[in-house]
Amino acid sequence: MNALQRLLANGSVRFGLTVLGLMLLVAALAPFLGTIDPAAMDSSFINKAAGSSGQFALLDGTTVQHTFMLGTDSFGRDLYSRVIYGTRVSLLVGLCTAALSLVLGGALGMLAGYFRGLDAVLMRFMDGLMAIPAILLAIALVAALGATIGTVVVAIAIPEVPRVTRLVRSLVLSLREEPFVEAARALATPTPVILFRHILPNAMAPLIVQGTFVAASAVLTEAILSFLGLGLPPDIPTWGNIMAEGRVQFSQYPGNVLYPALFLVPTVLAVNLLGDGLRDVLDPKFARRGS
């Protein structure tokens, strides 16, 4: 079987791709699936039950007849639209964090693994970063840089960089001794060409797998930061923000917390299972027996 057939034959990959594909579709179609502006609020519709309807005031002052499929929150905003639009922000944070951490960690890992003079300095710095709990480092960075989507992505990505760096470094240390790399050096091939043409392609499979785990962790970390009131501003709909706003009245209105959680949990699970499946297929050391 070719690589694509092996991937699709893996149950974890199929499940992860299906759920993640659905979430990406929801994010892309949020303006069409969302029934009303997620920022619009009407004080006469505070904490309405699912299925309630009435004349709802929009941000421009006009009113529309609207049915709240999941009810409203404690500010009179449509919970369904906020959860749908929250998919966009949460997935954007996860994907951008994974991309940033892979680029930074991959570059530093290749430098540390290929140039022995840089190895000790870079890895001691990475060890220092890893000594700080990831969530505390993220909180400190958000507090210092301010709460925007860009700063939240950076704050979540920085604690992930040392893990990616150590992974790439270990791969480069073994790859730099391979005959094809030694042959390239013997032919006076420029170092950047060796790194990007000979070493990086052979490290891509573990990097892709690591990227899925980083993305899942980032979505969860963003929700934690928002739940603690330290993430994105409350007016930006994210799953963490929605749950944070609903936790105060959880006993009376549990749906305000449970509805976004029903999106968060399967998304994180799907991305983690996708990573497990990719590891099983792409890394022979973790291949299942009989596959």
Image (cartoon, rainbow, N blue to C red):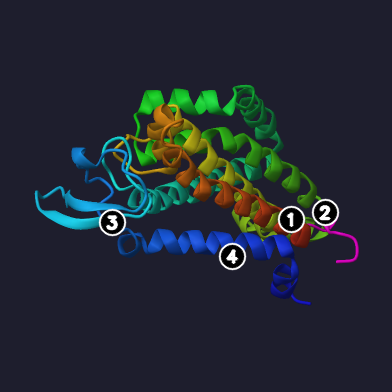
> Which class describes the residues within 10 Å of circle 4: few (<14), some (14-19), or many (20+)?
some
In magenta, the rendered stretch is 283-291
Q: Amino acid at mark 2?
A: Phe
Where is 209 relative to 144, above or below? below
The quarter holding residue 13 reads: bottom right
Q: In 3D space, how far apart are the residues under numbered discs 1 and 2 (Cα atoms)?
A: 7 Å
- 18 magenta-colored: no
Label 1 secondary element? helix
Observer-nearest residue: 201 or 119? 201
Q: Which residue is under mark 2? A: 286
Observer-nearest residue: 247 or 48? 48
Q: Position of residue 181 (x, y in %)?
A: 75, 57
**Which is nearer the N-term, disc 2 or disc 3?**
3
Q: Which residue is under mark 1? A: 279
Q: In 3D space, how far apart are the residues under numbered discs 3 and 1 (Cα atoms)?
A: 45 Å
**Which is nearer the N-term, disc 1 or disc 2?**
1
At a point 43% along the width and 30% down the height, the residue shown is: 247
Q: Amino acid at mark 3?
A: Thr
**Which is nearer the N-term, disc 3 or disc 4?**
4
Q: Which residue is under mark 3? A: 67
